[in-house]
Image (cartoon, rainbow, N blue to C red):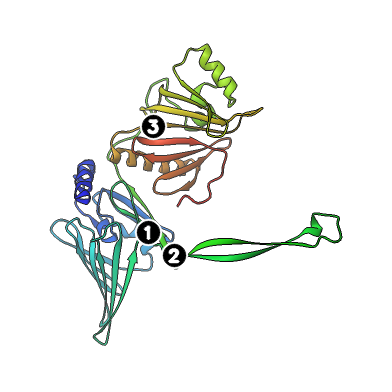
Amino acid sequence: MKRVFFIFIMTILCSTTVAQQKYHDAAMFNAPNGNVKYIEYEDGRIFFAEDGSLVKEESSYLSQYSAYDITRDSDGYPIEVTTDSDKTLIEYTEDMRVRKRTIIIGGEKLIYAYDYKEFPKVTMTRIEYIDDIPKTKETIYDMNEFDAQGNWIKKGIQGIKREKQVTHVENLNLLHTDPIAKQYVWTSTERYYEGREEQNRIVSYRYNKEFKRSDSPNEINIFYSVAHPFFFNAGWSSKGIKKHIKTNKIEHELKENVGWKEIEILIPESDKVFFGYPIGNMQYRCKKSGDDYYPYYRFYIYIDNIAERDGFFEYIVEDAKKHETLQEQTSNKIYLVSSLFSVYLVKSPYGIEVRRTDHTPVDWR
């Protein structure tokens, strides 16, 4: 029931974009929801036109094929793909996820069947026919993730949790002048997952709206916004921020000794906007010591419609590429850098969360 409700909600949210589509070629790559612009894998991209048709010339992921001919049903969904080396027949579930792929290479046949009964866990059965004798292998993907549109963005196998004892040896002669001290030996337990596998991809969407900056004098620059908490231009010190708040009688909430000797300042509303979208729910935190350190600051750009949020998110990515400020990207997070500042933008149910942090991103997956 929850799954049906989720599909119904996604249909409503995506109605403005789906109405523009004539074809649904992204469905054969298990991305049936929304007007998909591209699907990006580690080794290439599959690009789709605004009408939903696959654009072979701009799809580096399919560069090994010189031919890629698609036959669609009456609703615009691919049911057969013919390349220079094989033919693939595609069948779908009621909610247009891929149920079965039958690949014909020469006289041989290979079938991939997908079972979604335990969704989000997905069981894939591979059936290979050799001299008309079927050989079957079953794989259970139990570490999957789906984006807000309901499309598959991570396919993985959890693996079996294991532990092993590791012996560490430290040469103390490098640290001490005592000639007797030679080595310090200790053991630790390391945990790992045997057989873990995962494949990640980014699914990007079109949203038929022109995004442009507003004429408001309160329109912000995204890098300036994280360099100056609350847009005060009062520095990063909590002392300076509190003084500015007091002098200007700004509505706020102050919490002392939050967590481990931390100061937290919350300001719920702002008159600033970003591309006309309102900003609010601003939060500043720092450690309380002689000098403030490890400052953290974030705020939200409010966008009510999920499809519009995703479209704007994609616009920011493409704009950052043009200006060479895009450092790293996943389906839900962007890391932007300029010559002086850095900023994170993260999708949230409210719109886009903007974060400032001193730490370099390592692995967002």
- Which of marks 1 and 2 precedes in the sequence? 1
Q: Is residue 6 above or below residue 142?
A: above
Task: Give the residue displayed 22% in from the left and 51% down from the top.
Answer: 3
Viewer-nearest residue: 141 or 111: 141
- Report how many numbered discs are placed on residues in the image: 3
| Residue 93 spot, x, y in % from top left | 19, 60
| Residue 209 spot, x, y in % from top left | 29, 37
Q: Is residue 239 above or below residue 109?
A: above
Question: Disc 1 versus disc 3: distance between alpha carbons?
Answer: 30 Å
Please, what secondary structure does the residue beneath circle 1 have? loop
Which residue position is annotated with label 3? 301
Q: Residue furthest left?
A: 74
| Residue 140 spot, x, y in % from top left | 33, 66
Q: Amino acid at mark 1?
A: Met
Which residue position is annotated with label 2? 196
C-beta proximity under 8 Å, tags 2 and 1? yes
Q: Amino acid at mark 3?
A: Ile
Query: Which picture quadrant has residue 133?
Result: bottom left
Please, what secondary structure does the residue beneath circle 3 have? strand
Task: Give the residue displayed 29% in from the left and 39% down from the top.
Answer: 306
- Which of marks 3 and 2 precedes in the sequence? 2
Question: Disc 2 versus disc 1: distance between alpha carbons?
Answer: 9 Å
Observer-side mark, 1 or 3, equals 1
Task: Give the residue displayed 29% in from the left and 62% down from the top.
Answer: 122
- Which of marks 3 and 1 precedes in the sequence? 1
Q: Amino acid at mark 2?
A: Arg
**Mark 1 crowdedness (10 Å alpha carbons): few <14, some 14-19, many ≥20:** some
**Mark 3 crowdedness (10 Å alpha carbons): few <14, some 14-19, many ≥20:** many
Which residue position is annotated with label 1? 143
Horizontally, residue 349 falls left or right of residue 297, namely left
Question: Disc 2 versus disc 3: distance between alpha carbons?
Answer: 37 Å
Please, what secondary structure does the residue beneath circle 2 have? loop
